[in-house]
Every structure is written in C-alpha cells, then in structure tokens.
Amino acid sequence: MKFKFLFAIGVAVYLLTGLYTVPANEKGVVRRFGRVLTPLRSSGLHLDLPWPLARVDRVNFNEIRTLSLGEMEADPNFLIPTSAARPATFLTGDKNLLLLKINVQYRVSQEHVQDWLYGSVSPIQRLQLLVETTTTDLVSRCGVDFVHTQGLAELNNRLRQDVRRQADELRLGCDIEQVTVDRAEPPARAKAEFLDVSNARADMARSIHEARSYAEQKLAESQADARKITDDAEQTRHAKTSAAAGSADRFNLLAAQIQRDADSRNGTYGDSKQLVMNRLTIETLQEVLNRARMKIVLDAEHPVDLTFPPSRGDK
C-alpha cells in the first residue's frame, strides 16, 4: 500500500515536469520528440508532455546582444600583466599589423530560431569565427592608413554588409544589426612610429588648411581690389561721358544760336560765328583776369595793338 502511494506521488511529480512558464519578454520554443512545435509559446503558464519527451527553450527575440572580439594589447610600461591581453591581430594589405576591437550587435531570429538553437553546438562561436574571417579578408585588401584612420567608416559599412550576407547564407539563425571596428591600434612596439606618422599627417593637414585660408584671404582681397578698380573706372567713365555729352550739347546749342543770329541779321554764318567767338573770348578773359588780378605795364614808346582776337586779315 505504501509502495503504491509513493509510486503515485512519483508519477504525479514526473507529470508535473511538463508544466512550464514563459516570461513576459520571451517566447517558448517547444521540442516534442525532437520536433519543434509551431507556433511558439507566448508568455504564461503552459502544460506539455513531461521531460524528456518535451523540452522548452525560452528566447528573448527583442534583446540586442553584443559580441566583442579582441582586447587591446596592454602597454608594457604600465603595471599590467601582458599575458592578460588577448589582442586580435590582423595583417593589412601593405604588410602592417593592427590590433582591432570589434563589436557585433545581433538578435536571435524568430523565423530561424531552430538554426540558432539546434543548428550547431555553439552558434556564438560560429558567429565569432565568421566575423574574424570576414574582417581578415577585408583588412588584407586594405592599406594600414585606410584601416587605421582614413577609411574606418567605409570599412565598418562593408564589414556589416558582408557579415550580414554570410550569416544568412550559413543559416546562423540571427539578425546582424551592426558590426563596428571600435578601435584600431598598432602593436605596442610600433606605437611611437605610428604616433610620429599621425603627427606628421596632422602637421600636413594644418599646413594645407593654413595655405588654403591664406589663398582664400588673398583671393578675397584681390576680388575686392578688382571690384574697387572696376567701380572707380565706371565712375570715371560715367563722369567723362557726361562731361563730353554736356560739351557736345553746349556746342550744338551754340552752333544753332549762331545760325539763328545769322538768319535774323541776314548775314553770313562766318560773321555771326566771329562775333560770338569775340564775345566768348572777352568773357573768358574777364573771368581769367578777374581771378589773376595782374597789372600789365606797356612801353609808351612802342605802339601796341590791343585788338583781340585779330581780324581775319591780320597775321
């Protein structure tokens, strides 16, 4: 009797192993006799066949996971044991060594969760090897300057695309969100040389910037001088043109007046012109002499002809 009671309790406890819960932020992947059941179990309390007939894996498909590759090499000048460092060393296309620290952000794919959970013994190790081989292939086709400073953004973009494509082809069961090379440094023994190169490159960039600034300043000054010369020339041209136009208008008015005087007096145009010229000459002399205020002393013993201008018969 006691044996039957204990057996019944054991059977009940065994059947209760089929009772499981799924947290609110996860989903349950149930394998019954090794076959994955669909759809996935949502959060809450569920009952299935007891273990090992049914097994449950709980997966958070919204979690962004991070995989880090490569630790920076410790500086031997500091009191840190170098054996603790695990640098990820890569050879560039121009035969230089660089230490890279790579971060991979990914999510478990709900559509291909079987590949992630049951496709391999260690999917994280497969992902790590994939990132390392892809990075090695890309870095081996680039120069050290491209990887170290100049083309790091482009390298990250190409690395993300290649890792995402190959992860889909290999059916890793994860969605790659981002792959970034956070740090790229030379080995500790070569840091001084890399620092000298970086300083020289910075000096070159500064010199180029200063030269461009000086050129832009001189260009602006020359453009301002050219505009000033152009404006002055335009003003001079306008003044000369206006003065010439005014002189031409006055001459035309004077010629017309001479013609009218000749017509009104029934004389010739030459006689009227001579009278006008005499009048203008006298007015000019009066204006000039009034400004000069000079006295002319004449010799009384010699006759002086004060007729001005002389008549056409005089020479």
Image (cartoon, grey):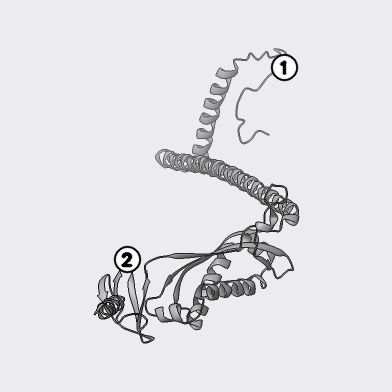
- The reply to whether callout 2 and callout 1 are in contact (CB within 8 Å) is no
Vertical comparison of 49 with 98: above or below: below
Q: How far apart are the two marked residues, 2 and 1, measured between alpha carbons?
A: 134 Å
List x then y, in percent, for residue 143.
69, 67
- Circle 1 — which element? loop
- The residue located at (53%, 36%) in the rendering is 274
Which one is earlier in the sequence, the residue at label 2 or at label 1? 2
Q: Quadrant of the N terminus?
A: bottom left
Vertical comparison of 33 with 82: above or below: below
Can you identify the residue that label 1 sits on?
302
Neighbour class for label 1 at 10 Å: few (<14), some, many (≥20)? few
List x then y, in percent, for residue 168.
47, 80
- Residue 112, quarter of the rendered image: bottom left
Vertical comparison of 17 with 205: above or below: below
List x then y, in percent, for residue 205.
66, 51
Q: Which of 209 and 261 is in front in this view?
A: 209
Seen as rendered, the residue at the extreme front is 1
Give the label, 2 or 1, closer to the camera: 2
Q: Which of 158 and 98 is in front in this view?
A: 98
- Circle 2 — which element? loop
| Residue type pointed to by label 2 | Asn
In the image: residue 216, left or right of residue 197 = left
- The residue located at (69%, 18%) in the rendering is 303
Q: Which of 231 and 59 is in front in this view?
A: 59
- The residue located at (44%, 78%) in the rendering is 117
Disc marking residue 25: 2
Q: In which quarter of the image is the C terminus?
A: top right
| Residue type pointed to by label 1 | His
In the image: residue 26, left or right of residue 269 = left
Neighbour class for label 2 at 10 Å: few (<14), some, many (≥20)? few
- The residue located at (67%, 13%) in the rendering is 297
